[in-house]
Amino acid sequence: MRKFVIIIVAFFIIATALIYFSSGFAFDYAAKKVLPRLLPHLETRGIHVDEYAYSSIRLASLRTVTVHEASATVSFKAATRDEKSYQGRLYAERLNFHLANIKDPAGYVSSDNFFLSVDQANVPGTTFGRFEHGYIQLRDPIRLGDPRAGLRVMLQRVSDLFSGKEVDPNIIVRVLVTLNVRGKEAQAYLYTKRGEGGASLCFDDQDIRSMADTFELELSNEEVSIIAANPVRAPIIMRLTSEAKETSRDARKRDSSVPEDAYRHVLWSYLLTQKFGAEFAEKVTDAHETLPTNTAAERKMDFHNNRIGRDYAQRGVPQERILALVTSDPAVIREPGDA
């Protein structure tokens, strides 16, 4: 009896090993057939995949197939003429396909410990430079009978999510991102948060405060909350805030008659309005004025000059004229006592 049990166990181990390793060959063959057909559909979304590779494909469980150590060079094509095209390098320690429905075969995708680095030579400070230690789960089912349709839906969901929109809560993301602002870098975890309208990306407030320290920016609690809730805009907000601060400070160094505080607020509000529109710019700048360090007169002056900056942007005033207007336009308040 004991020998019989040993034989059964040995047979089971051998059979399992054969299934495991033979499945690897089968999945590898299938991947080489399917991938060339799917990649052109990524092209239509502005994503070109080149030089892709993986170490192995195995059954992780009865319903999960895992691609190990997948990597690819990815080119992201600009959606409009005003945007830049850029390249990235993608690596995923594990890329999983989970079978969700057997009768009408369909599955969903997840990835553990993925990395994405983006070449920011042409777009410094306007996007996330690196994604590290990432996890993503896309639970929208992809029907095996028509994978292209499922792929289109999945890509649209991801595109919407990283455009700052709320999407179906079936998407889960948590990834460490690197922000590059005027030569300085800071990291924070970007993750999905469920709300009434679906899932959206956000930062933790404390991570935003740490970033502000790195970039030498003074942010109010309200500003921190706005930036945390608008993570796609966060690098640009911080870059424009830093740009206005440094530009006004440098102008003051060159000419001591320049009203540095007034110039900073007019320029900052102008830049934010150009990028995001007057309503969002007002929301950010009003939040900044809740800092307790300002006097009532200083706060009144800042609110006024922020409004002047929005007006310049809406009127299409060129940026190179802002400094001259700050020093000459009677509508600008240059000292708190003049408010």
Image: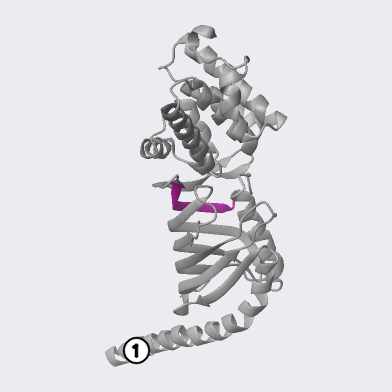
The colour scheme used to paint the residues is one colour
Picture coordinates of residue 156, whole percent (x, y): 67, 56
Q: Secondary structure at mark 1?
A: helix
Residue 222 against residue 296 in the figure, above or below? below
User: Magenta stretch?
Assistant: 168-180
Residue at image location 56% in from the left, 21% down from the top: 327
**Residue named by callout 1:** 10
Give the image quarter of residue 48.
bottom right
Picture coordinates of residue 336, whole percent (x, y): 49, 11
Q: Where the N terminus falls, by quadrant?
A: bottom left
Amino acid type at mark 1: Ala
Query: Is residue 171 covered in magenta?
Result: yes
Name the magenta segment's main secondary structure. strand
Q: Where the C terminus falls, by quadrant?
A: top right
> Nearest the camera: 298 or 237?
298
Residue at image location 56% in from the left, 29% down from the top: 267
**Residue 172 in view, yes or no:** yes
Residue at image location 48% in from the left, 38% down from the top: 238
Q: Is residue 178 left or right of residue 102?
A: left
